[in-house]
Image (cartoon, rainbow, N blue to C red):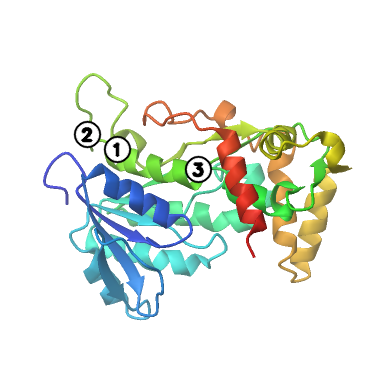
Amino acid sequence: MAASNHITKIAIVGAGGNSGSYMTEALIKTGKHTITAITRVDSQNKLPEAVIPSTVDYGKPETLVEALRGQDALVITLNSRAPKETEMRPVNAAWEAGVPWVLPNEWSPDTANEALVKDVSFFQPKVDTRNAIARLGKSSYIAISTGFWYELGLSMPAGFGIDLANRAVTLFDEGETKISTSTRARTGRAVAALLGLPVRSEGRNKEACLENFRNKVVYINSFTVSQKDMLDSALRVTGTRQDDWTITKEPARERYSSGLKEIQEGKHTGFPRLMSRVFYPDGCGDFEHNRGTLNSLLGLPREDIDEATKEAIDRSRSP
């Protein structure tokens, strides 16, 4: 338990991973915390020198409990399609170790939107994990909804429908539906800013404390943009014109339905197509305007979409 009104000891599952590394670096930069990385025996991820590695055996829950004992917060970052039981192991260990705060493996579109979760069953485990943490009682969660990673979704043709390498675009409907997305760097800064807040309010800003977000889903984003906005950014970065690209259209509902059919047939290739559900014109993908974000409260700076697009282009060229 934190000795003061601030979190000082943070454990991270996935500290060296695809998104966890950004959170780890951002937390280190604050200089406010002692960071422990929960790692498997066979992990090949490299960790910053400032991080304390703690090797655990997921087949032996007691090793997880021991690693988490005395921690003020646990941050979980896992593959988006990791089985629910994979996340529940550290969640249960946090409960047994008495860790007060857990940031679960949310990092996704708005899973508090029941219609979205109903249509995209892969999101249901995130809801189940939040409910389990609240039910267990010792720990409290703060689930951070980020939308899809902008630079990753844009770099994969099946993600946002934009093939940067071949200059081809498939617009879902008219390509004008806006979705909220985040860069991994933005998410790292958000985690560091959030866990840097006092546990209980201090000073005039009564909202800026962890207690205010206990057992809630909160929202941060970099951009709320349409496919056409993404394409416009790609045109600026590449110095090309629309005439240089092949542009086709596909109804978002048909794309989603075809992805669902592939998933039901056991084909994992349907997963990205299923994610086109956020491009429905019902607003489920735009949590910035439907829910509001913590961007301002956390002091997150504005980001340059063209810089993020350039990163996506560089990724699309990687072997």
In the rendered structure, the answer to whether residue 173 lies left or right of residue 5 reads: right
Give the Cα separation between the discs numbered 3 and 1.
16 Å
Q: Is residue 48 above or below residue 291?
A: below
Question: Toward the viewer: 211 or 161?
Answer: 161
Dot 2, how many residues are within 10 Å of its Cα: few (below 14), some (14-19), or many (20+)? some
Q: Can you give x and y, in whole percent of width and height, for residue 256 in the image?
A: 78, 51
Q: Can you give x and y, in whole percent of width and height, for residue 23 in the image?
A: 38, 50
Closer to the N terminus: mark 3 or mark 1?
3
In the rendered structure, the answer to whether residue 32 lies left or right of residue 263 reads: left
* Residue 250 visible in image: no
Q: Identify residue for label 1.
A: 210
Q: Which mark is residue 145?
A: 3
In the rendered structure, the answer to whether residue 269 lies left or right of residue 149 reads: right
* Helix, strand or loop for disc 1: helix
Contact check, label 1 and label 2, Cβ < 8 Å: yes
In the rendered structure, the answer to whether residue 13 lies left or right of residue 310 reads: left
* Helix, strand or loop for disc 3: strand
